[in-house]
Image (tube, rainbow, N blue to C red):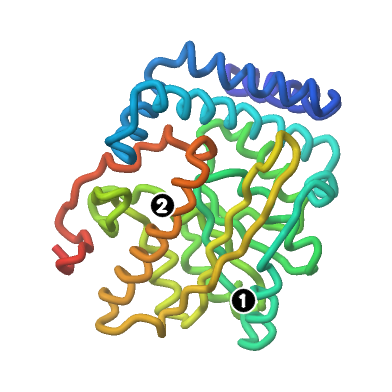
Amino acid sequence: MIAYLAYVLAKTGLFILGILPEGISYQIGGFLGLAGYMLDSRHRNVVFKNIRTAFPEMKTEEVKRIARRSFMHFGMIIVDYGKAFVKGPLWFLKRSEMSGYKSVVEYMKKSGKGAIILLAHLGVWEVLSSMCIVESVNINVIARPLKNRFINNLIKEIRERFPQKVIDKMGAVSSIGDILRKNEIVGILADQRAGGRGIFVDFFGKKASTVATPAVLAVKTDTALFPVFGLRVDRSRFRLHVQNKIESSDFKGTFDEKVFGITQRYAHIVEREVKKYPEQYFWMHRRWKSVPRKGALTDKGRL
């Protein structure tokens, strides 16, 4: 009952934010984020700790400023979903500028197979769908389901209004090969913590557990990885930028050495972008929480 009530409130809230004028709705989104910053001390402290880890020389006032802006940006993301819920994918497309995206389509045509898109918890990653609309390509986004199945289905419904299919993270790896062979795109949030048996790469000067899936797929299927960032340039204006592709052939050594090298390169790319737009990073994620356990992959090899 509580889960369903939360779903009803979420759906109603998204609808209201979706129909309100943009200026008002984004002011509300920013206010909701600021309220979260003030009231949610647990996540606020996580954000403070993460920002200090990434920027140890930063002054306290600047840490607090970035933290506040990060919470407010998260509130604006809720508004983005409201606009997508009510107005559909063309709303995003009309407000997005894009660069570098044709390199993905050209690669797919030349290779005769799909491509892997690497997404990070930075900016507005849903903007990726604008590229798919323009180029009429299908994208399959791997996502971890939310605990509330009603809200999870709502978010899935909103996402699938775009030319994309949401695939449950559990068991997704086994189907990715078939998706790539169908000349479709696979999108993976690739900067998540992967526990004690993940790949421990350098991220802001400290070892951070990272998911292995993108690099493993790149090596096993010889498929290129494209880092993509969707950023907010104004309240309701977005910019999508596709960076240079990463290929397994760029790396030498054993399977593990290639997987580690690919993952480390992507971590450096994300770090560079976060330094440019720290207010748009999801600092609530406990990025440096895990410590290496048996089976983890490090720069010294497999433990």
How would you rate the neighbour count of disc 1 (Cα within 10 Å): few for under 14, some for 14-19, many for 20 or more?
many
- Does label 1 or label 2 sit earlier along the sequence? 1
Q: Mark 2 points at which residue?
A: 271
The quadrant the C terminus occupies is bottom left
Residue 101 vs residue 84, the one in the foreground: 101
Residue 149 vs residue 259, the one in the foreground: 259
The image shows residue 43 at horizontal and vertical percentages of: 41, 23
Q: Name the residue under label 1.
A: 114
Q: Residue at x 44, y 72 (%)?
A: 217
Under mark 1, the amino acid is: Gly
For residue 3, side relative to residue 289 (left or right): right
- Toward which corner of the image does residue 148 lie, by quadrant? top right
The quadrant the N terminus occupies is top right
> Would you place residue 239 above or below residue 117 in this image?
above
Under mark 2, the amino acid is: Glu
The image shows residue 3 at horizontal and vertical percentages of: 58, 23
Q: Which residue is drawn at 63% across and 17% down?
A: 31
Residue farthest to the top, as pictured:
39
Q: Which residue is drawn at 73% across and 21% down?
A: 13
